[in-house]
């Protein structure tokens, strides 16, 4: 080892030893715990906790038009509800030399709104205007000439099992045109609506988002290749779908409605100006009382809704939400913690809170909650917000 | 001049690494007393002075720099850099608990440039801490409401402190009189962090960080008199120094950042208060020092320092839990052999001292007094570089009346290095 190398090694040794020593010494410092903390030589400010119950200063029900495009598509009519499904198959199913001899559409139904003895009946019509599942709403459907007047297929039957397949035949000419049209934006590629034809029940079937391809809407085509006469059967289970939902209801005075599938959403505002900057909201329990659920029997379980902090006056809301559930399985009293919202109202503007069905159900079901609002005559049924808060004195 | 660059590199690396924990690791801890006033007050003295019981304001030297005594700078004859760090280990106890705390802090960093050695004109600039705040404790409690009881713990942490930047000059109009002055700028911030955590993690908690920034200026003025030979030949080796730093009014700005959340995580909601301006006043302080050279190898020094905290101000008011403070310190130094051919051990300066101080803390109307025994040494690293070390052991406080007793052990290290840059002599063109 040369002298220069030896000096470098010595320098490095000193540096490393010093670093190790300094960090070792520093690690000897004991952080306090609640049990071994030392007394303070000055009186530390106490924390004061209080609670109060307040009531909404304003509330309303908002009927909106939103694109559904959820995990289920609904179709049917009953109990005041109307659901119209839309399906289209993209140009990946293109086959230009084909003669369709037979075509069936199979749907996997897993949801029913209405009695098990009720009838689900609908007819398929060709859509004449282009549409996008992420933007199409009930209002889109109202456009003049949205779909043709000639049915391409019909279904009528009962939905009695928890899940079952339903199947119906489609017009072969229409299906042939689907397969022979290369462009998705061509009229012949706009797909079909499934339009309820009589009062009965509403059914919900798995959409193209289903995990299993067996559950997705499946088009089975029995066809002949015109070039060589070969016969084949092909299934198609990729596409786009959505549904358009509506409920015409007369809202009872003193109530607030949360309705999935349309949707209806509730909005509420509380005056928390008595809370000061720096107050800590320990909890803020919102309690709401539900009217007895509808008699139009459902196999669904309307058990939860969510509340979002509104971020502006146009009821835009934050992604974060609180889930409200019944206090017990059969209870009509729902509670949830709005701590986050109340703390935000102290630190910023108060635009209220938006109540809605969770996304998993709002875009796929007709779940419904009717709660008593702040206008209900029986004060004990009004939504109440119980706030527990603490005040820490700032400054020395 | 032959310089041992490897030794210097090693020593500076050592200092940088020792100071790194104070920068990189915002941990460690110090006395709970630093929750009061502006925290623990630090004196801008050299490691040499610490080793002599915080005495030596009347000691002028070409090798050591005392930031607190500008009149003593006149003998600096080479451009000198000095930087130092301090390790403090504290055993802190109250009536029921005790903890060991440790921290590293930067002691000082200075640069002195002699302008005229004939006239003792030396320009000095440097940084040093004025106060440090570093405490950490918990309390627990219950908030009782009509419907619930909110059990919680509250953590109180303080950090930061005030620093000084100085720029000054000395002048020796005669051989027995030197004067000096410095511009002193105070700057820094102190954070008080309160963390409120309910025992029930579903309850909302919060963390408040209150930051108070300080800035202000004053001056420091001193004289050094060594003409006692006129009174008596026996007093010829004696020097006397006096330094005064007038009251400094600092502007302060306080703002609190608030973070809220649950489960010990405070990232859900935020808020900030409006910045609130106020003022603080660091009262006048003065130092009187005597030094005596006994024979060829021994120096004796004694200092008295005082600061009138009854005229201090925090947030515009005189704090009721602070009091006037003073310190008396005395020390002795065995000077090193001057000959460069002497053995290395003979070229080591050795020191010892003692100091006593009623600190400015007066919690619950109980004054906190502090005593310190010190020892130190300076050893040559190269022809014009020295490593200085001082160790202290002391204590303060009592455990009665809900107070705290500290026993501390400190090690201060600094390195000074000089080279003849920027030397102007009267006979040079």
Image (cartoon, rainbow, N blue to C red):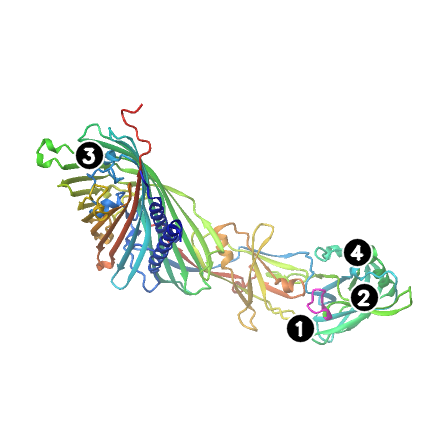
**Residue stretch in magenta:** A202-214
Which quarter of the picture shows residue A64?
Answer: bottom right
Observer able to see residue A140: yes
- Which dot, 4 or 1, sits closer to the camera? 4
Residue holding disc 2: A123
Asked if badge 3 and badge 4 are on a common chain, one would say no
Q: Quadrant of the C terminus of chain B?
A: top left
Q: Is residue A211 magenta?
A: yes
- Which element type, helix, strand or loop, lies under badge 2? strand
Q: Reading the chain from its start, which is encountered first: label 1 or label 2?
A: 2
- Which element type, helix, strand or loop, lies under badge 1? loop
Residue holding disc 1: A299
- Which dot, 2 or 3, sits closer to the camera? 3
Please tell me how crowded label 2 is: few (under 14), some (14-19), or many (20+) other residues with Cα within 10 Å. Answer: many
Chain bearing mark 1: A
Going 74% across and 55% down the picture, which residue do you hit?
Answer: A140
């Amino acid at each position: 080892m040369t002298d220069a190398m030896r000096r470098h090694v010595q320098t490095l040794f000193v540096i490393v030893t010093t670093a190790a020593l300094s960090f070792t010494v520093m690690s000897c410092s004991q952080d306090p715990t609640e049990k071994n903390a030392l007394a303070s030589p000055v009186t530390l400010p106490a924390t004061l906790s209080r609670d109060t119950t307040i009531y909404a200063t304003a509330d309303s029900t908002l009927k909106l038009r939103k694109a559904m495009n959820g995990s289920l598509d609904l179709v049917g009519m009953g109990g005041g509800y109307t659901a119209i499904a839309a399906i289209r198959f993209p140009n990946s199913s293109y086959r230009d030399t084909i003669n369709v001899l037979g075509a069936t559409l199979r749907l996997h139904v897993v949801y029913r709104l209405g009695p098990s003895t009720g009838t689900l009946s609908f007819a398929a019509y060709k859509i004449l205007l282009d549409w996008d599942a992420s933007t199409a709403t009930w209002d889109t459907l109202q456009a003049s000439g949205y779909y043709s007047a000639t049915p391409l297929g019909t279904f009528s039957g009962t939905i009695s099992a928890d899940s079952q397949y339903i199947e119906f035949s489609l017009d072969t000419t229409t299906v042939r045109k689907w397969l022979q049209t290369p462009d998705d934006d061509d009229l012949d590629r706009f797909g079909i609506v499934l339009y309820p034809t009589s009062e009965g029940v509403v059914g919900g079937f798995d959409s193209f988002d289903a995990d299993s391809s067996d559950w997705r809407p499946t088009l089975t085509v029995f066809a002949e290749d015109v070039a060589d006469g070969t016969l084949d059967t092909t299934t198609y289970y990729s596409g786009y779908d959505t549904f358009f939902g509506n409920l015409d209801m007369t809202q009872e005075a003193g109530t607030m409605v949360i309705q999935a599938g349309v949707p209806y959403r509730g909005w509420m505002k509380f005056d928390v100006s008595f809370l000061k900057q720096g107050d800590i909201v320990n909890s803020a329990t919102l309690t709401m009382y539900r009217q007895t659920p509808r008699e139009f029997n459902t196999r669904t379980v309307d058990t939860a809704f969510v509340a979002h902090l509104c971020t502006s006056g146009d009821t835009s809301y934050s992604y974060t939400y609180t889930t409200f559930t019944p206090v017990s399985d059969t209870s009509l009293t729902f509670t949830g913690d709005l701590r986050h919202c109340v703390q935000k109202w102290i630190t910023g503007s108060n635009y209220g809170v938006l109540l809605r069905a969770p996304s998993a159900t709002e875009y796929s079901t007709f779940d419904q909650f009717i709660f008593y609002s702040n206008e209900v005559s029986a004060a004990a049924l009004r939504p109440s917000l119980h706030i527990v808060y603490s005040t820490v004195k700032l400054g020395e | 001049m032959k310089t041992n660059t490897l030794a210097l590199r090693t020593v500076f690396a050592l200092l940088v690494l020792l100071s790194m924990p104070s920068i990189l690791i915002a941990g460690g801890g110090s006395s709970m007393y630093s929750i009061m006033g502006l925290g623990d007050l630090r004196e801008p003295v050299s490691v040499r002075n610490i080793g002599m019981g915080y005495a030596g304001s009347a000691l002028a030297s070409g090798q050591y720099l005392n930031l607190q005594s500008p009149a003593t700078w006149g003998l600096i004859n080479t451009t000198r850099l000095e930087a130092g760090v301090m390790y403090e280990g504290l055993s802190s106890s109250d009536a029921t608990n005790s903890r060991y705390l440790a921290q590293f802090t930067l002691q000082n960093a200075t640069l002195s440039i002699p302008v005229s050695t004939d006239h003792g004109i030396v320009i000095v600039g440097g940084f040093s801490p004025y106060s440090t705040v570093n405490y950490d404790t918990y309390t627990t409690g219950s908030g009782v409401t009509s419907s619930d009881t909110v059990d919680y713990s509250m953590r109180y942490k303080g950090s930061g402190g005030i620093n000084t930047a100085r720029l000054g000059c000395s002048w020796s109009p005669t051989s027995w009189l030197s004067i000096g002055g410095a511009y002193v700028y105070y700057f820094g911030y102190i954070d008080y962090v309160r963390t409120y955590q309910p025992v029930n993690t579903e309850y909302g908690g919060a963390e408040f960080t209150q930051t108070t920034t300080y800035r202000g200026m004053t001056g420091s003025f001193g004289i050094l008199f060594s003409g006692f030979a006129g009174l008596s030949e026996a007093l010829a080796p004696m020097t006397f120094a006096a330094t005064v730093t007038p009251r400094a009014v600092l502007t302060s700005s306080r703002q609190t950042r608030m973070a809220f959340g649950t489960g010990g995580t405070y990232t859900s909601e935020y808020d900030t208060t409006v910045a609130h301006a106020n003022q603080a006043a660091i009262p006048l302080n003065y130092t009187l020092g005597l030094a005596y050279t006994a024979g060829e190898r021994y120096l004796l020094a004694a200092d008295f320092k005082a600061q009138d905290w009854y005229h201090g101000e925090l947030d515009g008011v005189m704090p009721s839990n602070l009091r006037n403070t003073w310190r008396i310190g005395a020390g002795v130094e065995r000077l090193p052999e001057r000959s460069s051919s002497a053995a290395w051990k003979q070229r080591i300066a050795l020191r010892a001292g003692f100091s006593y101080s009623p600190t400015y803390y007066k919690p619950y109307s109980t004054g906190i007094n502090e005593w310190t025994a010190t020892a130190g040494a300076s050893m040559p690293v190269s022809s014009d570089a020295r490593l200085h070390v001082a160790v202290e052991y002391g204590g303060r406080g009592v455990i009665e009346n809900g107070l705290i007793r500290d026993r501390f052990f400190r090690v201060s290290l600094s390195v000074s290095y000089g080279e003849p840059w920027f030397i102007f002599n009267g006979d040079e063109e």
